[in-house]
Image (tube, helix red, strand yellow):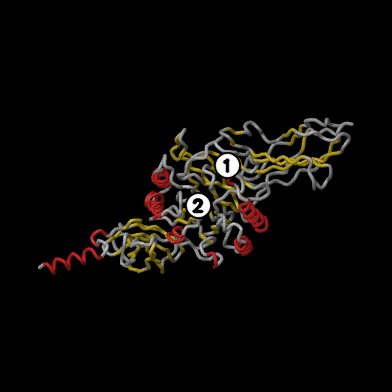
Amino acid sequence: MKKKIFIIFSILFSAPFLWAQKIEIKPYLQDAEPTSIKVMWQTNFGEESIVYWGTKKNKLKNKVSGTSFDINFTEKRVHEVAITGLTRFTTYFYKVQTGKAVSEVYQFKTPPFAGGSKKINLVAMSDMQNDWQHPTKFQEVVEEGVLPYFKKNFEGDISENLAMVVIPGDLVVTGSTFNQWEEHFFKQSEKLFSQVPVYPVPGNHERNSDYFFKYFSLPKNGSPEYAEHWWFKDYANTRIIGLDSNEGYRNIKQQLAWLKDLLEKTAKNDSIDFVFAQLHHPHKSELWIPGEEDFSGKVVELLENFTKESNKPSLHFFGHTHGYSRGQSKEHKHLWVNVASAGGAIDNWGEFEGRDYDEFTVTQDEYGFVVATIDPDKENPSFTLKRISRGNNIQFRDNELRDSITVFKKTIQPNTPVLVDLSKEEQSIYKLVLKANSFISDKKDAFHAGTNWQVATTEDFSKPTFDSWKQHENWYYKENRQKDDDLTDVILDRKLTKNTVYYVRVRYRDQFLNWSDWSTIETFKTIK
């Protein structure tokens, strides 16, 4: 009898408590394709990795097995299962199983092939790293922000209306601290990522940790020797590019060479209309100058050149600075969008060194997320960005629309402006006022969103004496510094040279980032 008791005791305590087997990180979706998708989850132990799936919630007749692997030198296991043989743009249901641990049933929708006619949405947000003063802020952004926003504005399950979530870094405070991944990131987002694929890139807080690369199964189409540090994913007519702007990787020449080559191929790909890149660090940051990185500027330059050569609009999402900013390149249909903060402590106005950059029209020290709606319309594809705000610690905002912009692939130029009231008589060398006519455009709903004035001593304007670019709004430090400016005139705020002939020209831009042609060049001469 004693021998039997000893054997039973030994069996029970030589294995990791079989009766307590559980799913610690609920299933989340990765690397979706029109005909395949990956499902991942974590258990406290157990090698078995099974997904049951089908097109009917109550009849998951298909079964597929995958792999499991160690995550923290313990019995804990991360599981990865690839479901293949799917049909494009179709809703599927699934559940996972490891031993006696079985999940509830979730659903997802496969992407369309390129060239489809359906509008698609993606969400961009970043820097959800835990703030000890507001430890569940990320969960609030997900469960009171993203999920209710889509429930209110779209019909059907969120998986049918949200294609993917992109995250430009800083998912946790310290990437090398194991428990933060479960507690700070996955548990707070489980209601979203069980139904919508997530595509992050590493931020500085990830610290290049193995945990980041074990927890995510990102596209492996970048440089082979730097797998998952940079990659791309196509969704309908849009190419999403992930980059690594962190120390140790931003100086690797292969990354920019890979990006340059990819953009050259994308320019020739007729099925791609737009490029959305994401990386962690900003090129310029109005709320926090010390966070800027030169590498990001090189990325912006490559994207601008791509847009110029291909006539395909582009943007880059970034984070690092904990607040929202949206700007645009002066000469290109390229947007700069800081999509923070989804949980990290806000970089409040005045807290750090900042700067009012010409490119940015809106900067807000608030929590929130960005919704991008892509319309693959055959005649003129477009995308619209909307900033949905959760406010800050001073003023709460319940999914308030705080900024929006639409960019079309096709260019419809505003009418060329005409200089007015420029006398041929000699002009003063101090504070000369230049004036042009009102904005006119044949494009529906277009309005005057930007003006570029140039004054030079040569007719080719190779070295302008005065180059002023102003936009219709400039929200900086809680106020619109462009309020009441109709953009049709400008004061030369510098002293001109006496007895000199100057050349003047002006152009107008609409809110869709379309520039007019330059005006006819006029001249004036300063007094002796």
Q: Position of residue 526 (x, y in %)?
A: 86, 33
Q: Which of the numbered marks, if any, corresponds to residue 288? A: 1
Q: Earlier in the sequence, mark 2 or mark 1?
A: 2
Q: Which of the numbered marks, if any, corresponds to residue 118? A: none
Front residue of 421 and 23:
23
Is 178 left, or right, of 225 in this rendering? Answer: left
| Secondary-structure class at tag 1 | loop
Q: Residues within 10 Å of mark 1 (few under 14, many from 20)?
A: many
Q: Please give the name of the residue rendered at 41% of the width and 68% of the height, measured from the top-left corner.
A: 84
Question: How many numbered marks have been drawn onto this rendered protein structure?
Answer: 2
Q: Which residue in the structure is indicated by mark 2? A: 169
Q: Position of residue 104 (x, y in %)?
A: 30, 57
Front residue of 154 and 32:
32
| Quadrant where the image shows the N terminus | bottom left
In the figure, residue 101 lies in which quadrant? bottom left
Q: Quick check: can you spot residue 521?
A: yes
Q: Amino acid at mark 1?
A: Trp
Q: Amino acid at mark 2?
A: Gly
